[in-house]
């Protein structure tokens, strides 16, 4: 079983919208079965702004991330993942306890004593210029493949 918590709500489940579809597709292309992963949110409440019929996620403040960190730590202690994946800056902040620049720290990292990996949030791909999306998605899939190898390496080491 791959235990790759991917940290970043609608319908009460993480990553069920457009960003979730990108995540699902990238994980499948990388050979990661989402059904065998643990997916959660770094911050346990949903802030949004209404734009017509759409609800646009609002980024949590550093204080909100800190406030919910205990919950995430308990969750991770129960799941005991092989590798923790931070999708985006908010998840990286929640897992590391300090701000980390995704573009500079992207890749394998130790997050609060756990094997980890930092990559972009799939919603980043939704917001970028069309001409950059294919290359950025390819890099995201490459990250997912590296994550799968990290998980396999952790299994071998255990």
Image (tube, grey):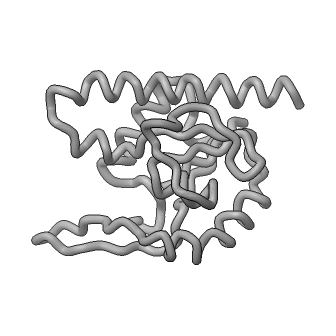
Q: Above or below — where is 63 with respect to 142?
A: below
Residue at position x 51%, y 76% in the image = 63
Residue at position x 41%, y 69% in the image = 60
Q: Is residue 3 visible?
A: no
Q: How many marks?
A: 0
The quarter of the picture where the C terminus appears is top right
Residue at position x 65%, y 45% in the image = 84
Q: Is residue 72 left or right of residue 74?
A: left
The answer to which quarter of the image holds residue 154 is top right
Query: Residue 104 in the image: x percent, y percent?
Result: 47, 36
The answer to which quarter of the image holds residue 70 is bottom right
Outermost residue on the right side: it is: 158
Query: Residue 30 in the image: x percent, y percent?
Result: 51, 24
Q: Is residue 132 left or right of residue 5?
A: left
The quarter of the picture where the N terminus appears is top right
Q: Is residue 99 visible?
A: yes
Q: Nearer the viewer, residue 69 or 74?
A: 69
Q: Above or below — where is 89 with respect to 125?
A: below
Query: Residue 103 in the image: x percent, y percent?
Result: 43, 37
Q: Is residue 11 left or right of residue 93?
A: left
């Amino acid at each position: 079983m791959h235990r790759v918590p991917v940290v970043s709500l609608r319908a009460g489940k993480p990553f069920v919208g457009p960003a979730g579809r990108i995540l699902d597709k990238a994980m499948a292309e990388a050979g990661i079965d989402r059904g065998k992963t643990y997916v959660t949110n770094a911050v346990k409440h949903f802030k949004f702004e209404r734009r017509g019929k759409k609800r646009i996620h609002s980024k949590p403040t550093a204080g909100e991330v800190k406030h919910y960190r205990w919950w995430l730590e308990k969750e991770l202690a129960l799941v005991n993942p092989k590798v923790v994946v931070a999708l985006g800056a908010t998840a990286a902040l929640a897992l590391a306890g300090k701000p980390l620049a995704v573009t500079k720290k992207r890749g394998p990292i130790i997050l609060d004593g756990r094997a980890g990996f930092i990559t972009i949030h799939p919603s980043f791909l939704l917001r970028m210029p069309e001409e950059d999306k294919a290359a950025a998605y390819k890099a995201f899939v490459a990250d997912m493949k590296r994550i799968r190898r990290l998980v396999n390496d952790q299994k071998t080491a255990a």
